[in-house]
Image: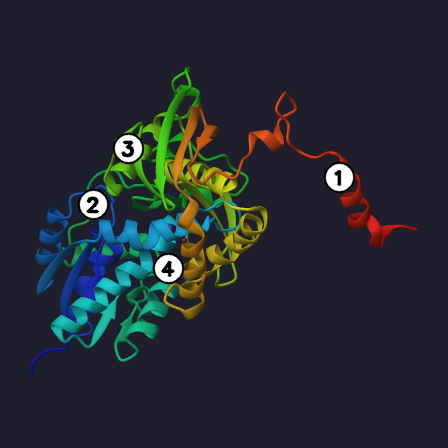
Amino acid sequence: MAREKVILAYSGGLDTSVAIHWLKEEKGFDVIAVLVDVGQGRELKPLAAKAGKIGAAKTYCIDAKREFVEEYLWPALQAHAVYEGKYLLATALSRPLIAKKLIEIARKEKAAAVAHGCTGKGNDQVRFDMAVLTLAPNLKIIAPLREWDLTTREQEIEYAQVRGIPVPVKKKNPYSIDENLWGVSIECGVLEDPDMAPPEDAYQWTQNPLKAPRKAMDIEIAFQRGIPYGLNGTKMEPIRLIQRLNELGSQYGIGRVDSIENRLVGIKSREIYEAPAGTILLQAHRELEALTLDRELFQFKESLAPKYAQIVYNGQWFTPLREALDGFVEKTQYRVSGVVRMRLYPGFATCVGRSSHYSRYQKSLATYEKGDQFDRRIAEGFIKVWGMPYKN
Ligand code: ARG
């Protein structure tokens, strides 16, 4: 009888390398390894070859960068999704997309199961499983790290060495790192002490702000209907635009975050994040909304941002609520076109100029100089009515 197939989200790291062997030898599956490119910035082809060497029957390399940007990053940007005020959700946003790709391949390959290398105490398992539960309830989900007895990295390395699974030979990275176009998440090792300042080597992309250029740099980001499409007057393809802003932001040490966050599974964890492009874009986008949206819409929309972030963080991407919120947000973006000038300083960026055809700013009303058209006489009556409920 033919063996059943399992579609494994393969990253090339130790966990998923051991998982290939384990799924094949211990569970009796034909393992199909899938590498999804969400802008990790690493060559996937050599990793695919490695999967084959370990025992994968087949490997897929999927370039999902464009889909990631257009269907995940832009909606999150427009919604101003930042979890607990700090985390731009790079890792969290990639999970539903990777799960979706696994499911597509599972259907094509008529596989019985999908598998991932998430730990049993993190958020990522929730995001993967939730996506599969909602999109393909008939697929079995296997999370080797929830099942096997290998509880430490050392045990995994030993398991690998005994069975001839290639283990990264270079000096063991002291951190657990997840990267994509939207940023890097870094945890473990010395970072587990929340009172210990992150060593400089924890940061993967960004330069120490103290080593950043001493001169500020102005950049202009053009948006159309809430989507960034140009830099300094030149049209730029979305992936390239994010990469370029990551480079510039990294030079200036922009977008570093050190946080204690509340995981869905009920524990607190310490994580370092870097999101240079996202940090710049988010600020720029909000500035353009401040210019173009009326007060009620601007403030109401902002009130939804923490909820949207929670939905992404908690693995509720493929739900009616997220879709409904996206519908609302999209509707608000009609006027969010224009150009925002951001000034990059060592360690942070700030908006220094914005313009739009849809600007609601009226100089004739705001000015304290000649040309003032605001009727000051009506203010008194307005305030009397406004304050009426409080008058004693
Ligand atoms: N804490 C982040 C989240 O839950 C990132 C998780 C993965 N982090 C890592 N360093 N591998 O989305």
- Name the N-terminal-most of marks 3 and 1: 3
Q: Which one is closest to the eye, mark 2 or mark 1?
A: 1
Q: Decide which of 260, 326 is in the foreground and name it.
A: 326
Instruction: Work out whether 114 lies above or below 47.
Output: below
Location of residue 233 in the rendering, given as x and y in whole percent from the top left corner? 29, 28
Q: Name the residue under label 4.
A: 124
Tell me the distance, in whole angstroms, between the alpha carbons under discs 2 and 1: 70 Å
User: Which quarter of the figure has residue 36?
Assistant: bottom left
- Name the N-terminal-most of marks 4 and 1: 4
Is residue 13 in view? no
Q: Name the residue under label 3.
A: 244
Residue type, mark 4 in image: Asp
- Name the N-terminal-most of marks 3 and 4: 4
Q: Mark 2 points at which residue?
A: 168
Q: Does the residue labelled 4 lie within 8 Å of ligand 1?
A: yes
Left or right: 238 as drawn, with respect to 319: left
The label on residue 237 is: none
Q: Which one is closest to the eye, mark 3 or mark 4?
A: 3
Q: Is mark 2 within 8 Å of ligand 1?
A: no
Tell me the distance, in whole angstroms, between the alpha carbons under discs 4 and 2: 23 Å
